[in-house]
Image: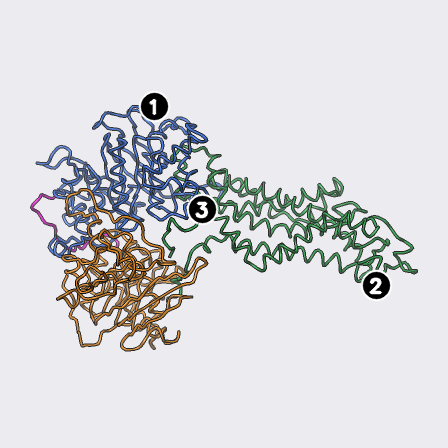
Amino acid sequence: MKPAANTTVRSRGPWELAFERLRHDPAAIAASATLVGVLLLAMLAPVIASLVGHGPDDQFLDVGLSPSGIPIGPNRVFLLGTDSLGRDVLVRIAYGTRVSLLVGVLASALAVLVGTVVGIAAGWYGGFVDRALSRLMDVVLSLPFLVFALALVAVVGPSLTISVTVIAFFTWASVGRIVRAQALSIRELEYVQAARTLGASHTRIMFVEILPNVTASVIVYTTLLIPGAITAEATLSFLGLSVVPPTPSWGNMLADAMAYYKVAWWFVFFPGAALLITTIAFNVLGDSVRDALDPRRDQATPISREDAA
Amino acid sequence: MTPGSAQTSGAPLLDVRDLRVAFSTPDGVLEAVCGLSFSVDRGHVLGIVGESGSGKSVATQTMVGLTRGARVTGEALFEGRNLLAMSPDELRSVRGRGIAMVFQNPLSSLHPLYRIGWQIVEMIQAHEKVTKAQGRARAIELLGLVGISRPDRRVDDYPHQFSGGMLQRAMIAMALALHPRLLVADEPTTALDVTVQAQIIRLLGRVQQEFGTAIILITHDLGVIAEVADEVIVMYAGRAMEVAPRRELFIAPSHPYTRGLLHAIPRADLAGGRLTPIPGQPPSLIARPPGCPFHPRCTEAVERCSREAPPLAALPGAVRHMSSCWLTEGNA
Amino acid sequence: MTASHVSARSGEPLVSLEHVVKEFPVKRGSVFTRTRERVHAVTDVSLEVRSGETLALVGETGCGKSTLARCVMRLHDLTSGRVVFDGHDISTASHAELQPFRRRMQMVFQDPYGSLNPRRRVGSIIGDPFEIHGLASGAERVTRVQELMQLVGLNPEHYNRFPGDFSGGQRQRVGIARAIALRPDLIVCDEPVSALDVSIRAQILNLLTELQRELGLTYLFISHDLSVVRHVSNRVAVMYLGTAVELAAVDDLYEHARHPYTRALLSAMPVPDPDRSAAREEIILSGDPPSPLDPPAGCRFHPRCPRVRARCSLERPALAAAPGDAADHLSACHFPVADHETLATTIAGQGAA
């Protein structure tokens, strides 16, 4: 039961309402703060490097390794310890954040862009266009990620660009499916019919009428896609398929650390923790965003008929 | 339509006293029902008329415990026992056997994946010890009673195989399965075509006459009320504006809201012409201003109306006709 | 195809429907589809809407009135038949060819909550017609939108509000403002008040009537509610299962209905007057309308008709004036009901009950 609209009630658009809810959600606040921290870490990586006086690729074979050649643990000089080549783990993690965020966000953005366009087109045009695009999405979704990535890199060689492209390629179809489903239900609504009676072109309807109503779920899905993309990048660089050494990324640091985990726990722990914390923060934020954007929260009371015995 | 034999043995079947239901929302406290009192006698049909936001559905649903997260005060005495004070288990045993409900959209009240007969039998078995065969026989009997042809075949159909009118009949059959003393029908015909609506209204009349079931009929349609109710309550913004026996309500409406409604309704039986609408919008139920909720839209409002909300008082000389208006003599 | 913007003289047909048929195939299959069955939504309907009048299309669910209205608006393609708008045959016109006509016919929808995009501001929504047809922009458009808002009884200062801030009746006004923005000739009103509260309906109906007078509009008014229709229409067409069964001037229809279905419909209308309600003829049809997937042969109403005879299941009756009736009172019945006749109550029809 909606309270009848009273013209003296302050007008709040749907985005404003969502933002209000988000502002008051403790989980969202904590997650956002964490992510701001991660972002700062990435942006300030050079600053950190100059503060401690170690570059990300500088090897300190004498000071950074024990006499027997094993990485040394956290101390005053190397705040998070060193890796197998005596490099500063803290600085490398900071620079690795850049790779992760860059790839994660870029790949997700690309996937969302393509997926949204395809999804809206499939949902709106229907008929043969829909069937063709849906089958395409089905095919893409059934391709195995790692096998394909390995094959591609074997042909082209590892790089950041390849990482982004590959991850985006495997992700756009799931966005497409969701957007298509939404577009299919929106096109039956009367305001879309109204646009048709006004003589609106297909493009106008798709972008002015359908897209804004799809944006909410797209945003939610994006915040949940990013951690997946970051993890995918970590996987790729773990296998040596992403950035080229000596460029640090969390994934290749973990790969290097595998052999040393018994003697140098910090080498595994800190990159792993960075990955975990970032992923969790995105997921929590995504959940909160989804709750905040849920249109059912705009209504006053839940009286559910389903309670009838 | 003549009313069924009313056994007015003194105590009413349902006696609601000063029911108040409020919800807390991010924008403030929403008072859906503010001090509603009414009673239903055995075998009588009470019509509750109101528009959206009037609180008519919230009131009855709260009575049987179907409202979550609400602050409820007041009493709802069903055969002497206060429904609002019962535990969920006690309420569950009252629902179905004492009070049964029929909703507007039968499709959402029935499970789409189970056969109709099965759902009826399941409901019976939840309250009484009967075998499957006995339950099934009763289900077939009930479906026939509500006018579904070939009930022996229809009992095994799924809800999607029934039309809208038939589904509503099936819902009524299910509601009657345990011989409830009171049937609450919440907008039972609103989603139906007019010719089907007429059939269902007729059926409700038969239920009253043949089973002696009391009925609370909730609707926004005054025409439906005119055909079937014995007594009528007109609700607005959570309060009762007028209570009257059926004929009196239509022939001598007292409250300005009732009169406004009757003038604003288009009629098929009278020649057309300009309608007299009620100006303005229904009020917000949050942060209600003092006074009568209808006064901003009332063409006869006086200063007092904006200060104090009038109580429901009997019209002079008419015990059963009450109005909540300062302009009624009994209230001056 | 050019479309002159001078509308037909009053009384002349503005829209002509000629033997319109609309069927929806029910498709099966996932990539390559096959058509198994067809929904016969509209079967051979011929009507005209005269300039300046309000023609109502009345009927229950499945009668095809909404589909027919959408055929007039060319939201659907016709299966066969013609739609002629002001002398121009638009039955097979392409999207581009229809553009000039889109300015001349508009629609008001039923659902005040679904007919406005919740993510757009109402000023933008009402301004759509100007933008789509490139007729006004910037400050001029804002002015014109605000004029429209005033015309329909909305506060122009609420230009930047979202639909969620308005009540049902106000949203409907927004929809009406959008529809009249380009001063169309024809407005198709699809159940414009059915989803509104009773006390608001009269406001919107009065608004529609006033606008018709002020702007010289022609209305095609779709409704299932016979009481509403009586107040706004000049002529009424009753539809049943895809066919027009009666067409008459409004008072003629209500007082001298000829078709048994019309009589049943009129008698089923709840009337807010206990005495009149008790006194009138009660015709309760048994069962529900059969499915448009498989309509009955002959007269489509015959399985539920109280006057059914052998001829009715064999021959579809044509829409024609009954003996003694005015030439513009048409009914499709082999045995039309005379004024003094009453119909039997509670018929045991062979309809699906």
Q: For residue C349: magenta?
A: yes
Say which element carries label 3.
Answer: helix
Residue with the mark numbered 2 = A263
- The 10 Å Cα crowd at callout 3, few under 14, some 14 to 19, many 20 or more, is few
Q: Secondary structure at mark 2?
A: loop
Q: Main secondary structure of the magenta part?
A: loop
Where in the figure is residue C52, as x and y percent of width and height? 23, 31
Does residue A166 appear anywhere in the picture?
A: yes
Residue in the image at 60% along x and 57% along y: A29
Using the rendered image, report if marks 3 and 1 lie on a common chain.
no
Q: Chain of mark 3?
A: A
Q: Mark 3 highlights which residue?
A: A185
Give the Cα separation between the discs numbered 3 and 1: 35 Å
Instruction: State if disc 1 and disc 3 touch (CB < 8 Å).
Output: no
Q: Are marks 2 and 3 on the same chain?
A: yes
Q: Quadrant of residue B59?
A: bottom left
Kindly check if marks 2 and 3 are in contact, taking CB atoms under 8 A apart as contact.
no
Count of numbered labels shown in the rendering: 3
Q: Front-most of A214 and C267?
A: A214
| The quadrant where residue C72 appears | top left
Hue used for the chain lettered C: blue
Residue underneath mark 1? C3
The image shows residue B233 at horizontal and vertical percentages of 23, 62
Disc 2 residue type (three-letter): Val
Q: Colour of chain B?
A: orange
Q: Given the image, on which type of amino acid does mark 1 rest?
A: Ala
Q: Give the crowd class for mark 1: few <14, some 14-19, many >=20 residues within 10 Å.
A: some
Nearest-to-viewer mark from 3 and 1 = 1
Q: Secondary structure at mark 1?
A: loop
Please state the chain letter of the residue tagged with numbered disc 1 in the rendered image. C
At a point 30% along the width and 35% down the height, the residue shown is C187
Q: Amino acid at mark 3?
A: Ser
